[in-house]
Image (cartoon, grey):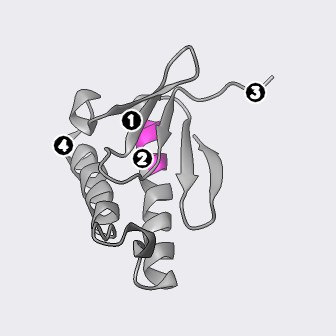
Amino acid sequence: MSVTPTYRLAADYDCHAVWLRRADGGLDNLAPDELGLSAALAGALQRWADIYNGTLDRSDPMSSGFATDLEHEIFSRWGRSLATWLAAALGEPVEYFDDASQVHVIVD
């Protein structure tokens, strides 16, 4: 039997990068500094979310996104690395949503 991780790392516009899965299956968005993480990890998670927010074109949301596929891939690889760091800090697996490949991955 597989267990769904409690925490999820995923980029979304105007959101923090970390999500907490509630018992009812819903998700709550958490600021990294609410989790008791190191300042380095909390800062890196915030920078990652800020970079994603920077791809939003508010005047034309449908044209939002990274300028190049390479930028998107680098962002996604950094996210995977942050998910590994977050899982180690929390002491439990983290679900990571890879925006470039549109795949959910369990990282521990």
Residue denoted by label 1: 89
Q: Do the numbered discs 1 and 2 sit on residues whose CB atoms are within 8 Å?
A: yes
Residue 90, relative to residue 47: is it above or below? above
Lower sequence index among marks 3 and 1: 3
Residue appearing at x 75%, y 27% in the figure: 2
Decide which of tag 2 and tag 3 comes sooner along the chain: 3
Q: Does the magenta stretch include residue 23?
A: no
> Residue 29 at what x, y percent from top left?
36, 33
Residue 57 drawn at (x, y percent)? 31, 71
Q: Which residue range is magenta in the image? A: 83-88
Q: Which of marks 2 and 4 is nearer the N terminus?
A: 4
Disc 2 marks which amino acid?
Answer: Trp
**Is 85 inside the magenta-drawn segment?**
yes
Query: The disc labelled 4 sits on which kind of residue?
Result: Ala
Instruction: Say which label, 1 or 4, has the lower sequence index.
Output: 4
Q: Mark 2 points at which residue?
A: 85
The residue carrying pointer 3 sits among few (fewer than 14), some (14 to 19) or many (20 or more) residues within 10 Å by Cα, namely: few
Left or right side of 90 for 25? right
The image shows residue 47 at horizontal and vertical percentages of: 25, 58
The residue located at (25%, 51%) in the rendering is 46
Residue for badge 3: 2
